[in-house]
């Protein structure tokens, strides 16, 4: 099965020039850093103790930020490597003032590129975040006797069923994981069935409050304008969801006179299309970064940048979490709760089902199915005063447990050298 997988990867590599051109045209790649995905550096290993984290994109990367800043205080660690797969996550990396943490794009999952990558960086520990499972890289990590941790692990029913199609292949790949730390009990059960021997439940990393982005705030004019309005945010929206929010805004503004709806799309390359949709409804749209500030007549504040969601959440009373009306599995509602905002979501929340169950029970989040329900619940919540939400203590405990478990594995590897 590994042979067939490698054959598939080789086909991808052969087609990569065409794929890269398409992605460049869509502004999904950095032309100056393309070689990182093929790992063209010489195999001259770096010296010193390195911890390596791999996070697919923005959400996974942000979930480990508190861990990174704490690990940077460890004098035994010379460098921390973070790899991601998306351009947006590489841009957000620049927002943080790390002292000994570097970013590189994750290489294509060829056994050759994986081996060259590991020979160069020589990590003491490899830590993969969420649902990042890469067969060739996992095998090379195992062959080089590097402990492999899967932290904040997430296996959905859908992905589990896919792995079961190639059962023996899956069992082999997951057996390479030294320790897994699942987000949910559902994931714990799936990991057991997939042949992971050591599984520790320490909680969801995304419950840890990430304070390191708070210094990236909006300018004073925008803040002043926001404080005069009732802010309703639609975060991480996908195609068709912006139109739903816009239609809801039209209904809400007849009942809440000072409402301002902030739309933060999941993918900023769609901004022009979104603006066309909003303009077709005769809405007054202000785009983030434009000169001046939103006026009292502004309906929609459209965000066209990555990494500033928290800057907006601190002024929000209510947040609609995108990816939940479309069949995407939903987006993480925890960040909104940290800022004392209530959450509205659609029915498609498989990615964060247990979190939403907890939040629904505590009346932090509310499920909607259509425009009528969205508008009705939003009106009710926007008119009420929000009670204090406190999930910070739980997050602090999870941070301590995570650091302890990573520290044990790292220290054990340092003793061997």
Image: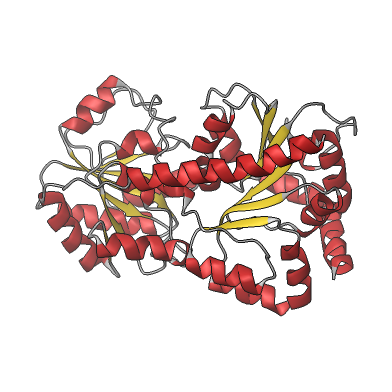
In the image shown, does 118 or 200 lie closer to the viewer?
A: 200
User: Residue shown at 59%/27% (left/top)?
Assistant: 72
Q: Would you say residue 3 is visible in this rendering?
A: yes
x then y, percent, for residue 289: 39, 28
Q: How many marks?
A: 0
x then y, percent, for residue 16: 80, 50
x then y, percent, for residue 306: 48, 37
User: Residue shown at 16%/54% (left/top)?
Assistant: 381
Quadrant in which the N terminus appears: bottom right
Q: Would you say residue 123 is visible in this rendering?
A: no
Q: What sort of colour scheme is used for the picture?
A: secondary structure
* Residue 36 shown left or right of residue 380 in the figure: right
* Residue 261 shown left or right of residue 404 in the figure: left
In the rendered view, tell whether residue 215 sits above or below residue 364: above
Q: Quadrant of residue 187?
A: bottom right
x then y, percent, for residue 25: 65, 43
* Residue 327 shown left or right of residue 405 in the figure: left
User: Residue shown at 37%/53% (left/top)?
Assistant: 333
In the rendered view, tell whether residue 40 sits above or below residue 160: above
Q: Quadrant of residue 104?
A: top right
* Residue 361 shown left or right of residue 5 in the figure: left
In the image shown, does 87 or 273 lie closer to the viewer?
A: 87
Quadrant in which the C terminus appears: top right
User: Residue shown at 72%/41% (left/top)?
Assistant: 412
């Amino acid at each position: 099965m590994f042979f067939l997988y490698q054959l598939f990867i080789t086909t991808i590599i052969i087609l990569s020039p065409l794929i890269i051109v398409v992605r460049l045209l869509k502004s999904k790649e950095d032309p100056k850093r393309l070689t990182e995905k093929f790992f063209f550096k010489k195999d001259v290993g770096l010296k010193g103790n390195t911890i390596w984290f791999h996070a697919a994109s923005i959400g996974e990367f942000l979930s480990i930020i508190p861990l990174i800043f704490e690990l940077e205080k460890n004098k035994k660690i010379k460098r921390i490597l973070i790899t991601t797969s998306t351009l947006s996550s590489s841009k957000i990396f620049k927002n943080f003032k790390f002292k000994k943490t570097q970013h590189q794009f994750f290489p294509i999952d060829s056994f050759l590129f994986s081996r060259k990558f590991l020979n160069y960086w020589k990590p003491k520990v490899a830590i993969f975040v969420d649902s990042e499972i890469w067969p060739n890289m996992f095998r090379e990590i195992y062959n080089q006797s590097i402990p492999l941790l899967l932290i904040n692990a997430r296996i959905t029913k859908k992905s589990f069923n896919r792995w079961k199609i190639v059962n023996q292949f899956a069992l082999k790949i997951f057996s390479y994981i030294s320790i897994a730390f699942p987000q949910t009990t559902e994931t714990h059960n799936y990991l057991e069935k997939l042949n992971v021997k050591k599984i520790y439940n320490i909680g969801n990393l995304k419950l840890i409050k990430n304070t390191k982005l708070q210094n990236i705030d909006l300018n004073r004019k925008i803040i002043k304008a926001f404080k005069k309005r009732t802010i309703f945010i639609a975060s991480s929206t996908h195609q068709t969801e912006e139109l739903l929010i816009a239609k809801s805004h039209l209904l809400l503004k007849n009942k809440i006179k000072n409402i301002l709806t902030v739309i933060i799309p999941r993918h900023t390359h769609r901004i022009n299309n979104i603006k066309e949709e909003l303009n077709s409804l005769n809405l007054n749209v202000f785009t983030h970064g434009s000169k001046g500030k939103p006026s009292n007549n502004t309906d929609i504040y459209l965000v066209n940048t990555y990494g500033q969601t928290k800057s907006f959440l601190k002024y929000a009373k209510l947040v609609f979490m995108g990816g939940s009306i479309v069949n995407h599995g939903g987006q993480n509602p925890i960040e909104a709760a940290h800022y004392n905002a209530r959450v509205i979501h659609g029915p498609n929340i498989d990615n964060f089902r247990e979190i939403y169950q907890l939040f629904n029970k505590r009346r932090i989040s509310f499920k909607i199915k259509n425009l009528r329900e969205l508008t009705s619940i939003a009106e009710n919540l926007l008119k009420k005063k929000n009670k204090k939400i406190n999930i910070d203590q739980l997050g602090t405990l999870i941070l301590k447990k995570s650091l302890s478990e990573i520290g044990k594995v790292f220290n054990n590897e340092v003793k061997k050298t």
